[in-house]
Amino acid sequence: MILDTDQETLPREELRELQVRRLRATVERCYQTVKYYRDAMDELGVRPSHIQSVADVRLLPFTKKENLR
């Protein structure tokens, strides 16, 4: 069942672009609003603008349960 034909039937390249835009927006929001993530990304030298593909998720800091306590 297709609920959103505009997004669910996008050509592969457009889908990748949409995914990257959304990932970058999420990373930007976290960087701007959550001190923990901003500090963790700064420590790794990562900025939201470094996200150029979905594969760049590997650049982001890994969060463990004990980091959130």
Image (cartoon, grey):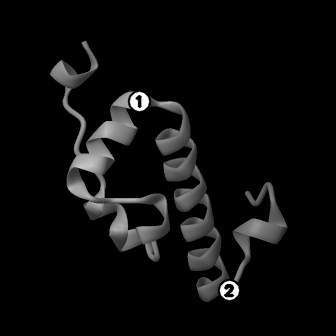
How far from the left and from the top, in percent, is residue 38? 39, 40
- Give the quarter of the image for residue 56: bottom left
Question: The disc labelled 1 sits on which kind of residue?
Answer: Lys
Residue 30 position (above or below residue 27): above
Residue located 27% across and 62% down the image: 59
Residue located 76% across and 60% down the image: 2
Residue 35 is marked as: 1
Residue located 37% across and 37% down the image: 37
- Foreground mark, 1 or 2, reads 1
Q: Nearer the viewer, residue 3 or 26?
A: 26
- Give the quarter of the image for residue 51: bottom left
Q: Is residue 8 left or right of residue 39?
A: right
Classed neighbour count for the residue bearing mark 2: other residues with Cα under 10 Å, few (<14), some (14–19), many (≥20): few
* Quarter of the figure that contains the N terminus: bottom right
Q: Is residue 40 left or right of residue 52?
A: left
Mark 1 to mark 2 CA distance (whole Å): 37 Å
Residue 67 position (above or below residue 32): above
Residue 10 position (above or below residue 40): below
Residue located 41% across and 70% down the image: 50
Element under label 2? loop
Question: The disc labelled 2 sits on which kind of residue?
Answer: Pro
Q: Which residue is mark 2?
A: 11
Residue 66 is marked as: none
* Quarter of the figure that contains the C terminus: top left
